[in-house]
Image: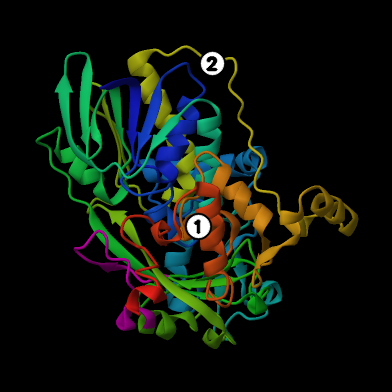
């Protein structure tokens, strides 16, 4: 058995944020993940926004960590070299009868400590957003609302944690957690591990891990959200993130820009049973279609390049559950929206709880910075030419839609933790995220993965496990 100070179960954005914060201390830390990479669950499929913090009910942990996390995000984005933009958000009111609800949201935001909140009326709203609906009456404006790349944030947190000594173990589903003398035994499909402290950051499966150690049972409900992602030709359609104020017709869907120039539309909120079912449905997408034109006009869904669904870890009390539930067992459970926005503050809070248990010593060698994958498109022509002269791989464009080069993909593979699948490359470099959705570049990406990882082409997967793309060769059939 391998003995650790801390084992974190789950390599989503919360688990990776916790790992990075704990790497400030002298400790032997392991992150175990059931999937083949970080950012394979809720963290990979969401609205990609940083909520300002006006929505969560005042006095809840969810509200507190949302505002704290939102305040931390700009500096974190600089330190970790990730895409982040403060673009503001608008909650649009479509009926004057809903004015009390808009005022309540404003007052809740003020109580939560959100800076700069104000209610704007029709004329100012239309001046800010030309594509706002003609029926819009007023809106709550939050200038601190922001957008981010959820993949980039999660990978950056993981890489920075690894840089500071944190270990990662993938394809390692946890089958049992049991108390032992001085700590816990964590059983995985790859064997048993021992640790002084367990942190349960298992997302949709955090109830399963929680219920292994306590009779105070928890139930996580997978809440599916369906989305449309529109082509970069829609860049600038909206500047702010546009929400609809819940009214007589229910809660609408958001329309928002992304940090990469797309437009995202959604989500639905449909409770399901299967925690691994991220398939979109016709009914779900039709629901988004029906609602997305309420707060905005001229939205062209024919510009859609893909649709997808993500699952949120919903618990009936709609609250984060963070704390030591058994000696040395710390929950970080039921982290649904605004979990992405709250993740930096979640990391700090959970690391503080663990430090209170173990009384860890500060590590003076901790380095909280990370340099992202070099994108030649950000360089001047002279700088790019010099880069290609030194490393010709940066002149070989593999993904034409997003202009991603072989050099970027090689970098993504050899990082720690690095890409081992098509999805790993896609989320780190955007190779395969453009109009053709990998239809053109996937074979070349597979060749690069095969060469750099030293594995046969028929072992390369889309997303780990049995998601292999090659099932045989032409000669086998002759």
Q: Is residue 374 left or right of residue 134?
A: right
State which quarter of the image contains the C terminus.
bottom left
Few, some or many residues within 10 Å of mark 1 (<14, 14–19, 20+): many
In the image, farthest residue toward the left:
215
Helix, strand or loop status at disc 1 = helix
Circle on res. 363: 2
Query: Relative to the observer, which residue lies in front, 159 or 292?
Result: 159
Query: Relative to the observer, which residue lies in front, 127 or 332?
Result: 332
Query: Relative to the observer, which residue lies in front, 129 or 222?
Result: 222
Instruction: Where is residue 193? Give x, y as percent.
Output: 25, 27
State which quarter of the image contains the N terminus.
top left
Query: Looking at the image, which residue is at 43% across and 67% down?
Result: 100
Query: Looking at the image, which residue is at 58% across and 77% down?
Result: 435
Between the residue at mark 1 and the residue at mark 2, the CA separation in whole angstroms equals 42 Å
**Mark sitting earlier along the chain (1/2):** 1
Q: Which image quarter: residue 192? A: top left
Q: Tell me which segment is drawn in magenta.
A: 267-285
Q: Is residue 428 left or right of residue 225?
A: right
For label 1, the residue is 106
Q: Is residue 59 visible?
A: no
Query: Looking at the image, which residue is at 42% across and 24% down?
Result: 352
């Amino acid at each position: 058995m391998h003995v650790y100070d801390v084992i974190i179960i789950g390599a989503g954005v919360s688990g990776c944020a916790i790992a990075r914060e704990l790497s400030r201390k002298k400790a032997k830390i392991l992150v175990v993940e059931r999937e083949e990479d970080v950012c394979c669950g809720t963290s990979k499929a969401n609205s990609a926004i940083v909520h300002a913090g006006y929505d969560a009910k005042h006095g809840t942990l969810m509200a507190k960590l949302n505002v704290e996390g939102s305040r931390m995000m700009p500096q974190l984005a600089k330190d970790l070299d990730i895409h982040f933009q403060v673009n503001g958000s608008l909650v649009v009111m479509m009926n004057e009868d809903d004015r009390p609800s808009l005022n309540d949201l404003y007052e809740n935001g003020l109580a939560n400590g959100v800076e700069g909140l104000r209610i704007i009326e029709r004329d100012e709203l239309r001046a800010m957003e030309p594509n706002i609906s003609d029926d819009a009456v007023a809106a709550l404006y939050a200038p601190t609302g922001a957008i981010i790349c959820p993949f980039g944030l999660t990978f950056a947190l993981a890489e920075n944690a690894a840089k500071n000594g944190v270990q990662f173990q993938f394809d390692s589903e946890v089958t049992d957690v049991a108390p032992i003398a001085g700590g816990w035994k964590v059983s995985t499909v790859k064997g048993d591990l021992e640790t002084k402290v367990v942190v349960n950051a298992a997302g949709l499966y955090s109830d399963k891990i929680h219920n292994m150690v306590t009779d105070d049972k928890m139930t996580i409900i997978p809440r599916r959200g369906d989305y449309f992602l529109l082509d970069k030709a829609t860049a600038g359609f909206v500047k702010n993130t546009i929400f609809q104020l819940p009214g007589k017709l229910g809660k609408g869907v958001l329309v928002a820009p992304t940090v990469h120039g797309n437009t995202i539309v959604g989500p639905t909120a449909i409770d399901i049973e299967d925690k691994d079912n991220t398939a979109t449905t016709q009914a779900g997408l039709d629901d988004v279609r029906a609602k997305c034109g309420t707060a905005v006009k001229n939205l062209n869904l024919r510009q859609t390049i893909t649709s997808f669904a993500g699952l949120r870890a919903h618990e009936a009390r709609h609250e984060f559950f963070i704390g030591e539930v058994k000696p040395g067992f710390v929950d970080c459970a039921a982290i649904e929206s605004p979990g992405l926005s709250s993740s930096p503050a979640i990391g700090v809070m959970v690391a503080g709880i663990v430090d209170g248990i173990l009384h860890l010593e500060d590590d003076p060698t901790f380095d909280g910075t990370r340099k992202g994958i070099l994108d030649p498109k950000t360089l001047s022509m002279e700088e790019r030419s010099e880069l290609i002269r030194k490393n010709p791989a940066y002149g070989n464009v593999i993904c034409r839609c997003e202009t991603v080069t072989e050099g970027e993909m090689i970098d993504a593979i050899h990082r720690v933790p690095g890409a081992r699948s098509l999805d790993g490359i896609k989320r780190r470099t955007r190779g395969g995220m453009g109009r053709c959705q990998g239809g053109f570049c996937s074979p070349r990406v597979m060749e690069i993965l095969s060469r750099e990882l030293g594995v046969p082409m028929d072992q390369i997967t889309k997303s780990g496990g049995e998601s292999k793309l090659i099932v045989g060769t032409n000669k086998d059939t002759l």
